[in-house]
Image: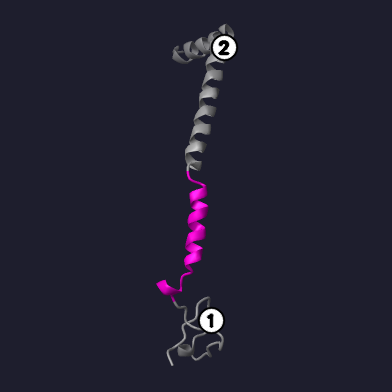
């Protein structure tokens, strides 16, 4: 019988402890044991979302364009232009 190596601080048979009866070494599934229907279902889900990222980018781009247009309208006002001019002038003066 191969020595049982336990994780998470359990005592292994090699260290004098007893291995749990219901624990077995993990096994990797073979390629033949994978359900082909599962793959088809996953493919349908992914195919149903085709183009979603492109649509999200388009919506985000349109929101950014709208926000930029709003800023242009606000910053073209005489009062805002005066405030910004005074701010730059004060930042560039020494003393």
Query: Is residue 46 rendered magenta in the image?
Result: yes
Q: Position of residue 10 (x, y in %)?
A: 53, 81
Q: Are marks 2 and 1 in contact (CB under 8 Å)?
A: no
Q: Which residue does the image show at 47% across and 88% down from the upper left?
A: 15
**From what the image shows, is residue 29 above or below residue 74?**
below
Q: How far across and how far down the image is residue 45, in percent? A: 52, 53
**25 or 41: nearer the eye?**
41
Return the mark for residue 84.
none
> How many marks are shown on the rendered structure?
2
Task: Using the image, determine if residue 95 lies above or below residue 61.
Answer: above
Residue 66 drawn at (x, y percent): 54, 23
Residue 10's label in the rendered image is: 1
- Residue at (49%, 86%) from the top-left corner? 12
The image quarter in which residue 3 lies? bottom left
Q: Quadrant of residue 22?
A: bottom right
Separation of residues labelled 2 and 1 (CA atoms): 70 Å
Does the stretch in magenta take in 34? Answer: yes
Viewport quadrant of the N terminus: bottom left
Q: Give the residues in magenta.
A: 28-50
The disc, 2 or 1, on the residue closer to the chain's N-terminal end is 1
Which residue is the extreme one toward the left? 31
Q: Residue at x 52, y 37 (%)?
A: 56
Element type at mark 2: helix
Q: In the image as oriented, which residue stretches furthest toward the top?
A: 78
Dot 1: element: loop
**Picture coordinates of residue 17, whole percent (x, y):** 52, 90
**Label 1 packing within 10 angstroms: few (<14), some (14-19), many (20+):** few
Disc on res. 80? 2
- Looking at the picture, does residue 29 appear above or below residue 56? below
Q: Residues within 10 Å of mark 2 (few under 14, many from 20)?
A: few
Q: Main secondary structure of the magenta part?
A: helix
């Amino acid at each position: 019988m191969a020595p049982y190596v336990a994780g998470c601080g359990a005592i292994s048979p090699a260290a004098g402890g007893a291995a749990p009866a219901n624990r077995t070494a993990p096994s990797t599934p073979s390629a033949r044991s994978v359900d082909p229907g599962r793959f088809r279902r996953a493919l349908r889900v992914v195919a149903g979302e085709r183009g979603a990222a492109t649509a999200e980018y388009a919506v985000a781009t349109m929101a950014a364009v709208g926000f930029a247009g709003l800023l242009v309208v606000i910053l073209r006002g005489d009062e805002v232009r005066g405030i910004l001019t005074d701010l730059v002038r004060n930042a560039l003066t020494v003393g």
